[in-house]
Amino acid sequence: MFTHILLVNQWQTWVIILVVVLLLFGATRLPALAKSLGQSAKVFRKEIKSDDTDEAPTASSDQPADKK
């Protein structure tokens, strides 16, 4: 029932969240927080993209190993 209230008044919910964040962190620290969040997202996207392109092909298990 509580989630229904949050979904109906979505813009009011975001205003309340913004006010709480302002009270917790203060207006002077918010730009630094946003900058670090943006840099983290940029690094994350870069690592995801490089992980997809750098993935080496795995060895095929169709061939049996050499017997000694």
Image (cartoon, grey):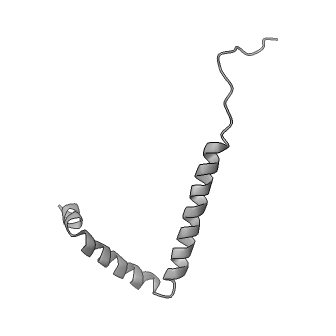
Say if 43 sits above or below 37 in the image: above
- Residue most extreme to the top: 67
In terms of image quadrants, where is residue 41?
Answer: bottom right
Say if 68 sits above or below 53 in the image: above
x, y percentage for residue 45?
57, 56
x, y percentage for residue 65?
74, 16
Q: Residue visible at 62% across and 53% down? A: 47
x, y percentage for residue 6?
23, 66
Q: Residue visible at 60% across and 50% down? A: 49
Observer-nearest of 40 and 21: 40
Q: Residue visible at 19% across and 65% down? A: 8
Q: Is residue 48 left or right of residue 1?
A: right
Q: How many marks?
A: 0
Q: Quadrant of the C terminus?
A: top right
- Residue most extreme to the left: 1
In terms of image quadrants, where is residue 52?
Answer: top right
- Residue most extreme to the right: 68
In terms of image quadrants, where is residue 1?
Answer: bottom left
x, y percentage for residue 25?
46, 82
Observer-nearest of 52 and 37: 52
Say if 35 sits above or below 66 in the image: below
Q: Is residue 2 left or right of residue 55?
A: left
